[in-house]
Image: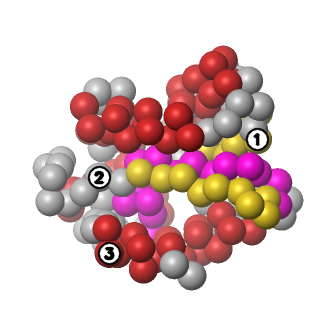
Amino acid sequence: MKWNSKEEAVIAHREHPCNRVCHDGRAKVRVDAVFNVILPQSRVLDLGCNDGDFGNMLIKEKDCQVYGVDVSEKVGIKAIENGVIFSCCDASRLPFETGFFDFVNASEFLEHILSIGEVLTEVKRVLKSGGIFLGTVPHPDIENLDEEKYHCNAFTHKILTDLLSD
């Protein structure tokens, strides 16, 4: 679904069932896979960090320095309580220095973004040389979460490969 405004997209994202069941089922498997790749004591950016639960796991279990961004100030309060260095911003305009992060995480995030090209350009900018971009998305042929209501993008392996090959 294409929304008429950023606000409509944010509301749809907040209502998405994945945000209520993030630690169950397929989404948990994907998030766990990302967690296992991130090295201890890394500087990590978590795009669409929501309440900072993922960042908190990285802080507690891997001694990472975690920065999180989200368009909702409300979730930022919880993210800060979870130890995440939070910025309320659009991921297409990140407030960080070039080459600042070892890892950028976009778990269960890109399917909600209207300006994917701009976001990926920013990801490239803020990653250190040799840094790693990690992300997960639901597969449109496997998961049935009323995608048109909550997602503005659907990704197959080919679409992701084409997007990330630049």
Q: Quadrant of residue 160?
A: bottom left
Please indicate whether residue 57 sits to the left or right of residue 44 in the image: left
Q: For marks 2 and 3, give the CA distance.
A: 14 Å
Residue 76 pos. (x, y %): 62, 34
Mark 2: few/some/many CA within 10 Å (<14, 14-19, 20+): many
Which residue is pictured at 31% across the width and 68% down the height?
157
Which residue is pictured at 74% across the width and 49% down the height?
102
- Residue picked out by circle 2: 138
Q: For marks 1 and 2, give the CA distance.
A: 26 Å
Residue 150 pos. (x, y %): 28, 54
Q: Which mark is residue 43?
A: 1
**Considering the image in quadrants, where does the N terminus appear?**
bottom left
Reading the chain from its start, which is encountered first: label 2 or label 3?
2
Q: Is residue 69 magenta?
A: no
Magenta-highlighted residues: 99-115
**Considering the image in quadrants, where does the C terminus appear?**
bottom right
Determine the secondary structure under disc 2. Answer: loop
Residue 66 against residue 163 in the figure, above or below: above
Residue 80 pos. (x, y %): 69, 27
Reading the chain from its start, which is encountered first: label 1 or label 2?
1
Q: For marks 1 and 3, give the CA distance.
A: 30 Å
Mark nearer the viewer, 2 or 3: 3
Q: Quadrant of residue 5?
A: bottom left
Residue 97 against residue 32 in the figure, above or below: below
